[in-house]
Amino acid sequence: MAQSARSFVGRDSELQTLTGLLGVASAGSSGARRQHVLLAGDAGVGKTRLLTALRDRAVTDGWQVHAGHCVDFGESAVAYMPFSEILDRVVADLPDVVERVAADYPALARLRPVRRVMGANQGAAPTGTDRGQLFDAVHTLFEAAAEKAPLLVVVEDTHWADQSTRDLLTYLFTRPYDGPVAIVASYRADDIHRRHPLRRQVGEWGRLPDVERMVLEPLSDDSVRLLVHELAPGKVDAERVVRRAEGNAFFVEELVQAGCDEDLPVDLADLLLVRLDRLDGAARSVVRTASIAGRRVTHELLAAVTEMKNDELDDALRTAVEQKVLEPTGSRYTFRHALLAEAVYDDLLPGERVRLHARFAEVLKETPGLGAAAELALHAKHAGDLATALRARIAAAEEARSVSGVGEAAHHYEKALGLAADPKVTKAAAIDLDRVYERAADTLILAGLPARADAILAERLDAIPAGPSVGRALLLATRAEAALLMEYGDPLTYSSDAIAAVPEDAEPKVRCAVLAIRTRTLVTYRRSEEAEAVGLEGLEIAERHSLTKLASDIATSLSMLKVRTGRAAGDKVEGFRQVLRETVDQARRVGSTYAVSRGMFTLGRSYDEAGDFAEALRCFQAVVDEAGGESLQWSPFVAAARTDIVRIQMILGEWDKALALAGGNDPDAPPIPVALLGTLRMIMEQARGASVGHAAAALRPFWDEEGLIALYGANIEMVAAAREGDHEAVFATYADVVEKLSEFWTEWFGGRVRLGVVATAGIADMLPSIPAAQWPALVAKVDGLRADGEQVVAQYQPGEWGPEGQAWSARLEAEVLRVHWLAGIDAPSQESLLAAWARAEQLVEAYGDVPGLAAVRTTYAAIQRATGDVAGSRVTADKARETAKRLGLQPLLDELKALGATAVKQQQATSTALTPRESEILTLVAAGRSNGEIGKQLFISTKTVSVHVSNILGKLGAGSRTEAAAIARRQELIS
């Protein structure tokens, strides 16, 4: 009978590379560089065999090796499963180390397998684990274990990893280790399709400096021949195996095991099932039963399901192990390959599957300690017991939330609501459906999906009576919270209706929770007096009934109110900020993470609006850091803080950081925050010369969802239209975005000034190419943009129009004057034009907008040169050029290059007198005619026109046709 190869065939070089990367061969060298490794390869190519050889080598060299496995539970992912397995092994080997770490990090206990099964926490308070502490605990545990001996951690099959496991791996990959700790994570490369959640993660991991990606290629033909000889010397046609296996080690072993006969089917599933046919009846029955559990099953669960006598079960399992169908791994039995488990499962008759799933569900209900709620949900659904599946889905969601796995929790709740759509199932499950909807919506909000939360809440509210009830009140309050995160919806109405829906006999906690959300809503809309009255009522209830988290939430809202309405109070603002800091600290002490995020985000916005970018970045980064990992990266305030970090880094000229954080496409991320980050990325790419107008226009469907996408996207579209010379598109885009944002915000929203700057600058750049007959109409429209900007500023109280607004207002005035100057319509004096641009430069520099300052200086330098201040122009241009080079702003560099070339021509010019032909051509240039049009009108060649235009620019010292026209009007060279 053929067996697995005893020797290690065809992978010596890969093993040497792997041990070198991990530093296994240099464990005693403190200076040796170690890297974590991502091991990729197709199913069956030999990843597990290579890792087994690595383990043997590491153990021989004195390393500790602990492995955990990800399991394919389909829709019922179990958060942190491989790390629970690893922790169980460390407990067995180093109980004192685990006990010491757990004393400092109680969150570690949540990963213990005994704590993860159903029923283990009955009677315990349903408090969630702090995600940051959990991640720190695992990192600290690895450090502590490495003090005993070098530690190698192996996580297999991460293509099945849940989001929380991937988040924890990210944390461990990015944190340094003082001791010798190395991590290997393996995954099936052929499973990572375009939308697979691991695809983006692998790309990010691979860019980390301490992570190396290693791809395990198929065995060479010679290696396959050696493997065949090792498995069954002289018994199998090696060339046929080489031809059919295509270098896949698992397929080689399966073909050899089956004898590679001619009659064997070529389909892999049939090939895998050949081995099953060699088992006796009892072993085959046990294996078929085990396939219902997936890749792995514990001995205890299998024994309970089969109800076989111990010796009979042992005999059957021993046969399966000897035939290489199953492999013992601790207390579990594992199918030798996932494809084998799938093949066995698929071979079951439909009735068999239903009966076996029902049996697994029955055992898990009777003995919860044998598995997790997610497993029960899976089996109950396939067994047709939808009521049990619904209850188990809800339990699985809450279990995922308890370890901060909001992505998995949201998934489980969505599946639960699908089951609950059948009233019979809901009635049989005996659940509080209002509560399920409320928790599902709250989880979706944390997962960054407020629109989805709003949709399911609307669905439920339409289905229940309109009178007062606890369920209706909490559903309305949660809907108000979701609406606060969207551009549409009516949080003021929802929160008001929620208060009205609270029954008189409701528990104090219910009324307090509704008052907390009402206070939060009123603070957002700056309804100060009402917010304070509602907030104080809620605080009184919270303090009287010891509702510490709700008290912290309301106190944070009231502190935020003082910060937001205290801008004009001078030094008092910092005092209000200090009160908010103290409130945030209190929220941390009571574990109100949502209040902490809101408070720190508000502090960040306060500093941001005041132009204190360093402090704003510190606050926003704290929001991101305290979220504890990527599973919460799209929760409302974390996503908003990340966007603000990118925006501020963009303003400060830290574009490499900003582009890295803005990232690329993430198929698993909520579309709205990803699109918003995308617009910021496109603004930077466009400034570097990229053509992104069409990409920005493709985001217009998101304008209804997020106003900032509309603001930034319209910015991009107008710049693109100006570059294409389409002034009608510039004004059309401005009108579209103003109309849309007026629906969400207010008619005179602050961003209109920025939009006016972009539109006016585009018109100024295009003016020379537009027929002069159209100039009066364009100038009138530009004057309208200035009037819009003035109306916006008039809406603000003294002191409220901060540094950013002042900078944009100064730019708008300067650009409007430039248009008038270029068109020669109500042209400003040279002194007022230069003064306006000098003021724009001053205020943009004071605000700290690095790329904006480079743009202002580029235009200012051109105006200085055109008005005769060549020396001043050079100084201004040099400053702009330094920034443009550093950030790669190619369009600005091109403009500055043209200015530099003009300076040389001006120095070489010997006469400024224009010939009659040059005067004639200059008149047509000022009228916006192209060289071709001028040539046709004067009956000369386009090339001759070009020569004349070059001479004109040189004589006038102009850097462009626009400047030449302006100089000609100023010096009255043309009528």
Image (cartoon, helix red, strand yellow):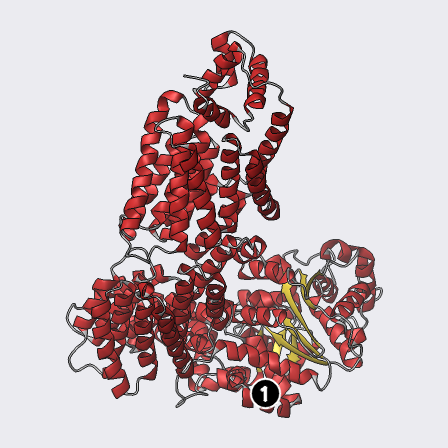
Work out whether residue 150 or residue 707 is closer to the camera in this orientation and state it: 707
Residue plotted at (54% across, 23% down): 956
Q: Secondary structure at mark 1?
A: helix
**Quarter of image, res 2:** bottom right
Tell me how many marks there are: 1
**Residue 578 point in image, percent of width and height:** 39, 75
Mark 1: few/some/many CA within 10 Å (<14, 14-19, 20+): many
**Residue 574 point in image, percent of width and height:** 38, 70
Q: Is residue 731 left or right of residue 902?
A: left
Residue extending farthest to the right is 234
Residue plotted at (58% across, 23% down): 954
Residue plotted at (62% across, 22% down): 909
**Quarter of image, res 547:** bottom left
Work out whether residue 89 or residue 175 is closer to the camera in this orientation and state it: 175
**What residue would you read off at disc 1?**
101
**Residue 298 point in image, percent of width and height:** 57, 81
**Residue 897 point in image, percent of width and height:** 60, 34
Question: Which image quarter is the C terminus in?
Answer: top left
Question: Does residue 775 appear anywhere in the picture?
Answer: yes
Q: Is residue 579 left or right of residue 340?
A: left
The residue type indicated by label 1 comes to Val
